Image (cartoon, rainbow, N blue to C red):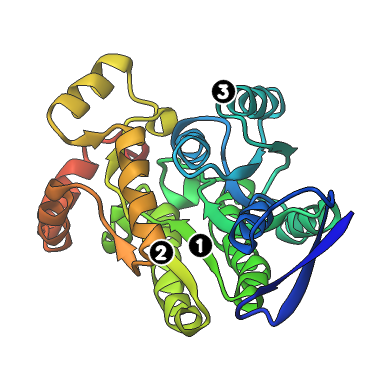
């Protein structure tokens, strides 16, 4: 057996690979072997946008994956399918990320398993439409913990490791609604505005350490999140009001790997935001009169 020493720039560490004496690996080949132990972590990975992130990271970027979801059966099925189809390692994690200590538990799981996270995709999210005072405390807490507390702590924990290594990518899913003050989705809008501004601030902090932090702000996406009927979903895509998740993710990953601060995929979204921001109050009140949850 022979021992090949490889120095990883920025980390100031010496890494040793133990290989058969007859092997002829060069240093660049050895580094590619080291690269294989780096993982991408995707939350909300069992369906929709999260599933697309997992699939494209495996198919195009050849990342091994840590896949997290609160859907136990589905996340194990997804992990097996991606592993079989793309030949990458996958780790399925069944976890509710809306609990108070979720981020610390997930981080410790990765440390204990030796899963070094190079890409963090904070995608898990929930959506509901209701008057705030008619919404249960549990439902409000679920959204705030999932969208704010867990995202913040995952960025802090895994971002610290990335900063120490001198390389990493963080993608946080915000929303076009971050610029809107709309009744019925007050907690959703506010939490997405938090994610946007949090990510932008962290981008400044992490840039000089070689770590990118990107906020993605999509408009409507063709998933089951909004509870639309299948025919309405097809119509929304045909009219370019809604975007297929695979198209969104392709654009988002390109922005992330370029370490862009933020991105809003979709030309129409750039037109809608200023219009909605300046929507007259009387228009909003007129619409509210037609929505059941605001009727007395």
Looking at this rendering, what residue extends furthest in the right direction?
1
Labelled disc at residue 85: 3
Could one spot residue 290 in this view of the protein? no
Q: Nearer the viewer, residue 73 or 162?
A: 162
- Does residue 212 sit above or below 222 in this rendering? below
The secondary element bearing badge 3 is classed as: helix
**Alpha carbon separation for disc pair 1 and 3:** 25 Å
Earlier residue among tags 1 and 2: 1
Quarter holding the C terminus is top left
Q: Are marks 1 and 2 in contact (CB under 8 Å)?
A: yes
Looking at this rendering, what residue extends furthest in the top direction?
231
Quarter holding the N terminus is bottom right
Residue at the disc numbered 2: 214
Binning the other alpha carbons within 10 Å of mark 1 as few (below 14), some (14 to 19) or many (20 upward) gives: many
Q: Nearer the viewer, mark 3 or mark 2?
A: 3
State the residue at coordinates (76%, 75%). Answer: 14
Picture coordinates of residue 170, whole percent (x, y)? 51, 62
State the residue at coordinates (63%, 72%). Answer: 156
Binning the other alpha carbons within 10 Å of mark 2 as few (below 14), some (14 to 19) or many (20 upward) gives: many
Q: Are marks 3 and 2 in contact (CB under 8 Å)?
A: no
Q: Nearer the viewer, residue 284 or 35?
A: 35
Earlier residue among tags 1 and 3: 3
Residue at the disc numbered 1: 170
Q: Nearer the viewer, residue 176 or 108?
A: 108
**Alpha carbon separation for disc pair 3 and 2:** 28 Å
- Does residue 178 sit above or below 228 in this rendering? below
Picture coordinates of residue 257, whole percent (x, y)? 40, 59
State the residue at coordinates (61%, 70%). Answer: 162
State the residue at coordinates (64%, 48%). Answer: 138
The secondary element bearing badge 1 is classed as: strand
């Amino acid at each position: 057996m022979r021992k090949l020493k490889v120095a990883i720039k920025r980390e100031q560490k010496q890494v040793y690979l133990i290989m058969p004496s007859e092997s002829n690996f060069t240093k660049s080949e050895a580094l590619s072997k080291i690269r294989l132990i780096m993982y991408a972590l995707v939350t909300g990975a069992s369906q929709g946008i999260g599933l697309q992130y997992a699939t494209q990271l495996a198919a195009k970027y050849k990342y091994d994956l840590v896949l997290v979801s609160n859907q136990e059966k589905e996340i194990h099925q997804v992990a097996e399918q991606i592993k079989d189809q793309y030949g990458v390692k996958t780790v399925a994690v069944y976890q509710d990320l809306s609990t108070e200590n979720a981020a610390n538990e997930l981080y410790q799981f990765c440390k204990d398993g030796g899963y070094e996270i190079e890409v963090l995709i904070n995608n898990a999210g929930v959506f509901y439409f209701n008057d705030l005072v008619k919404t249960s405390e549990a439902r409000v807490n679920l959204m705030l913990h999932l969208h704010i507390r867990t995202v913040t702590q995952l960025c802090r924990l895994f971002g610290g490791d990335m900063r120490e290594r001198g390389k990493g990518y963080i993608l946080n899913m915000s929303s076009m609604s971050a610029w809107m003050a709309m009744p019925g989705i007050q907690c959703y809008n506010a939490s997405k505005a938090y994610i946007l501004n949090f990510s932008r601030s962290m981008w400044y902090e992490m840039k000089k350490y070689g770590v990118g932090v990107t906020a993605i702000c999509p408009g409507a996406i063709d998933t089951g999140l909004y509870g639309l009927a299948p025919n309405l979903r097809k119509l929304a895509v045909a009219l370019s009001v809604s975007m297929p998740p695979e198209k969104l993710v392709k654009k988002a990953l390109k922005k992330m790997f370029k370490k862009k601060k933020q991105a809003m995929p979709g030309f129409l979204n750039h037109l809608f935001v200023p219009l909605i921001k300046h929507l007259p109050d009387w228009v909003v009140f007129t619409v509210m009169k037609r929505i059941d949850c605001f009727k007395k």
